[in-house]
C-alpha cells in the first residue's frame, strides 16, 4: 500500500514525532510511505528527516512559504507524484487543505489538538462543508470526538486511536548515553513548547519551593520557541527569582530518551493536552512523573511513580516534585499505548477503505 502522511509543518513536536514513528513502522512492514507538509521544514526537524530517509520514507516538503493557492498546488503535485492509496492528514489545517483537492483517494484526518479548534467560526464552517470528504475522523482522545460531535455532528466513521511510543527506546538502559548528557544529579526536566498552555511559569514557582529543601536540585526546560513573548516571560521569572544558576531554559532537543534517563523527575503541568507523546515517553522511561490533573493524564494515575496534582498551586506542586526526587524509577506496562499498537490501528483503518476500492477496480 502507498500511504501519504500529511502534516502542517515538519517540526520537533508531538504529532510529528508520532507521524515519524508510524511512517517508519509501516515502511518496514513493506508499504511505501511519504510524509508531506504545507509549510517548509523547520531546522529542529533535521535529525528526524535523516531518520526517515534512512528508513526509506519519502519526504516532500515545500522549500518556500506558499499562500493558500500555492499550498493547494503543492499538495496536488505531491499527490500526483506519489500516487497514494490512502492519505492520513494530521491536524485541522492539513485536513482542510487536502480535502479541497480534486482527488478520489480515501482520506482520514487525525485530530491532535488539545483544544477545540472549532471555536473558530471559519474552521467550523469549513469543516461542516468538507466533513464527508474524509472517510474517517480519528481522535487521539475521546475529547476530540466529543468536540467534533458537538460542533460538527456525527460522521459515519469516528474512532479514537491513542498515540503510542516505542517503549524500548526509553526503557533501555544506556548508561553511556546518560553520561554524555552531563546532567546534574537531581535534575527535574520539563519538555514542551514555550506556550502558555504548557505552564513553564508554574514549574518555576514550584521549583523555588523545591530549592528550599533541596538546594542541589536543577531544573531543565527543553522545547520549541513557539510563543516568543511567553519564552521571554519564562526567562524574566527565572531572573526575578535569581535562579539563573539553577534553571536552564533550553531549546528543542532530539535526544529525549537520554535526557529522561539522566533526569530524576519529569514535570508536565499542561493546562490542556489531547494525548501527549512527551507524557507517554516519560511513562515508558520509568522516570517519576509529576503532572497536572487534566483528563488526558487520568489513565496514568494508577501507575507507580506518577503524581497528578494541582500544578497551579506552587506549594502542592513543589511538594510533589520534592517527593518525586526521592522516588525510584518504575517499570510500567503501556499496553495500548505503544507505537506498534498505534501503527496497527492506523493500518486497519487504511485497509478498511483501500481494499474495497481495489476489489471494485
Image: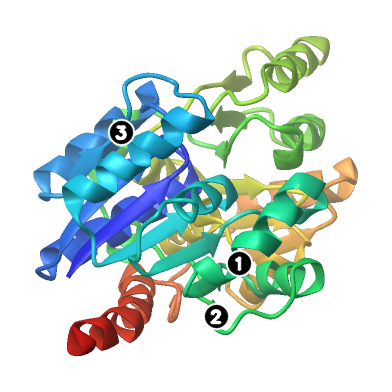
Q: Residue at x 74, y 54 (%)?
A: 125
Residue, disc 2: 159
Q: Residue 246's x, y, as percent?
A: 63, 20
Left or right, 85 with reference to 130: left
Q: Nearer the viewer, residue 26 or 210?
A: 26
Q: Judging from the image, what secondary structure is the residue with disc 3 in?
A: loop
State the separation of the CA atoms marked 2 and 3.
28 Å
Vertical placement of residue 53 versus 237, above or below: below
Q: Residue at x 56, y 45 (%)?
A: 93
Residue, disc 1: 131
Q: Looking at the rendering, which quadrant does residue 129 occupy?
A: bottom right
Q: Residue 352's x, y, as percent?
A: 34, 85
Q: Judging from the image, what secondary structure is the residue with disc 2 in?
A: strand
Q: Which mark is residue 61?
A: 3
- Residue contact between numbered discs 1 and 3, judged by CB atoms under 8 Å: no
Left or right, 135 with reference to 147: left
State the separation of the CA atoms marked 1 and 3.
26 Å
Which of the two discs, 1 and 3, sits closer to the camera?
Answer: 1
Q: Residues within 10 Å of mark 1 (few under 14, many from 20)?
A: many
Q: Residue at x 32, y 71 (%)?
A: 343
Amino acid at each position: 500500500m502507498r500511504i501519504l502522511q500529511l502534516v502542517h509543518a515538519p517540526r520537533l513536536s508531538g504529532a510529528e514525532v508520532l507521524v515519524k514513528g508510524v511512517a517508519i513502522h509501516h515502511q518496514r512492514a513493506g508499504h511505501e510511505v511519504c510524509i508531506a507538509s504545507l509549510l517548509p521544514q523547520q531546522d529542529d526537524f533535521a535529525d528526524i528527516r535523516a531518520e526517515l530517509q534512512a528508513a526509506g520514507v519519502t519526504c516532500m516538503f515545500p522549500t518556500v512559504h506558499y499562500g493558500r493557492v500555492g499550498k493547494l498546488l503543492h499538495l496536488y503535485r505531491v499527490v500526483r507524484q506519489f500516487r497514494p492509496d490512502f492519505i492520513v492528514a494530521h491536524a485541522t489545517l492539513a485536513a482542510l487543505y487536502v480535502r479541497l483537492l480534486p482527488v478520489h483517494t480515501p482520506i482520514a484526518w487525525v485530530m491532535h489538538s488539545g483544544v477545540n479548534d472549532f471555536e473558530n467560526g471559519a474552521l467550523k464552517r469549513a469543516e461542516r462543508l468538507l466533513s464527508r470528504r474524509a472517510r474517517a475522523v480519528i481522535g487521539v482522545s475521546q475529547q476530540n470526538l466529543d468536540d467534533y460531535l458537538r460542533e460538527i455532528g456525527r460522521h459515519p466513521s469516528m474512532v479514537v486511536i491513542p498515540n503510542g511510543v516505542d517503549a524500548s527506546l526509553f526503557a533501555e538502559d544506556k548508561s553511556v548515553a546518560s553520561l554524555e548528557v552531563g546532567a546534574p544529579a537531581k535534575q527535574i526536566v520539563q519538555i514542551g513548547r514555550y506556550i502558555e498552555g504548557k505552564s513553564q511559569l508554574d514549574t518555576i514557582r514550584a521549583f523555588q519551593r523545591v530549592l528550599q529543601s533541596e538546594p542541589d536540585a536543577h531544573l531543565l526546560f527543553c522545547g520549541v520557541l513557539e510563543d516568543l513573548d511567553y519564552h521571554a516571560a519564562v526567562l524574566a521569572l527565572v531572573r526575578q527569582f535569581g535562579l539563573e544558576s539553577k534553571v536552564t531554559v533550553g531549546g528543542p532537543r532530539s535526544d529525549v530518551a537520554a535526557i529522561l534517563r539522566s533526569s530524576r523527575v519529569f514535570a508536565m503541568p499542561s493546562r490542556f493536552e489531547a494525548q501527549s507523546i512527551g507524557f507517554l515517553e516519560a511513562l515508558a522511561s520509568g522516570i517519576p512523573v509529576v503532572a497536572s490533573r487534566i483528563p488526558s493524564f487520568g489513565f496514568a494515575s494508577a501507575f507507580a511513580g506518577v503524581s497528578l496534582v494541582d500544578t497551579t498551586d506552587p506549594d502542592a506542586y513543589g511538594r510533589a516534585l520534592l517527593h518525586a526526587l526521592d522516588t525510584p524509577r518504575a517499570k510500567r506496562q503501556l499496553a495500548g499505548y505503544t507505537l506498534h499498537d498505534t501503527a496497527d490501528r492506523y493500518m486497519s483503518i487504511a485497509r478498511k477503505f483501500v481494499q474495497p476500492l481495489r476489489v471494485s477496480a
